Amino acid sequence: MEKLVVLEPAMSDIRFPEMRHEIVRAVKALADPVYQWSAWIRRELPPGEYDEFTHRIHILYDDTQVLEDPDAAIGIHLRSQKEADAMRYLAQAIDSLFNELGTDLSDEEYLRSPGWAAIVDAAGAALSTLRDDG
């Protein structure tokens, strides 16, 4: 019996690789609590640079919609079902926090909330998947 081999899109097959780079940067920021406190709370960034939680959320939900519909992002921003599943897990963690706390808190209030660890964990898993599939 023949084994069916499913080929995942290579980076060259992704329609918007530059936006994928922004997605990876956003996920990396969400996975790094040290960076979050330094950049988002204490504003310790190089001159001319800016970052905050809201900016990362806009990239993932609004600009790319990768967290709105991860499956639809395969071949556009994501390379595989594995990546889509990891991004869905991250979306669930973020949605859960927003459902519990709303969307109007400061970055520091989100970072101090008990649910923040789930976002960091989900982002770490997503980042690992985004990098491993490359």
Image (tube, rainbow, N blue to C red):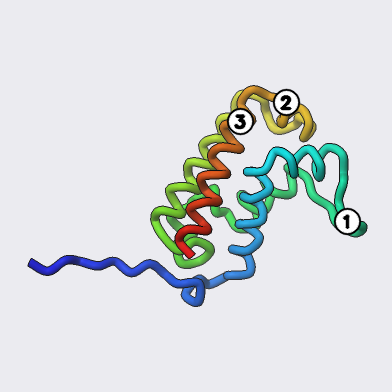
Q: Which mark is residue 117?
A: 3
Marks 1, 2: nearer the viewer = 1
Q: Is residue 118 rendered to the left or right of residue 82?
A: right
| Disc 2 target residue | 112
**Real-space Cα separation, disc 1 to disc 2, in angstroms:** 25 Å
Residue 75: x percent and y percent? 46, 67
How would you rate the neighbour count of disc 2 (Cα within 10 Å): few for under 14, some for 14-19, many for 20 or more? Answer: few
Relative to 63, does residue 108 appear above or below in the rendering?
Answer: above
Q: Which circle's residue, 3 or 1, is located before the other in the chain?
A: 1
Q: Secondary structure at mark 3?
A: helix
Q: How many marks?
A: 3
| Disc 1 target residue | 46
Q: Does residue 15 appear anywhere in the picture? A: yes
Q: Residue furthest toward the left?
A: 1
How would you rate the neighbour count of disc 1 (Cα within 10 Å): few for under 14, some for 14-19, many for 20 or more? Answer: few
Q: Mark 3 is on which residue type?
A: Ala
Q: Is residue 73 rendered to the left or right of residue 16?
A: left
Q: Does residue 94 appear anywhere in the picture? A: no
Q: Which circle's residue, 3 or 2, is located before the other in the chain?
A: 2
Q: Secondary structure at mark 1?
A: loop
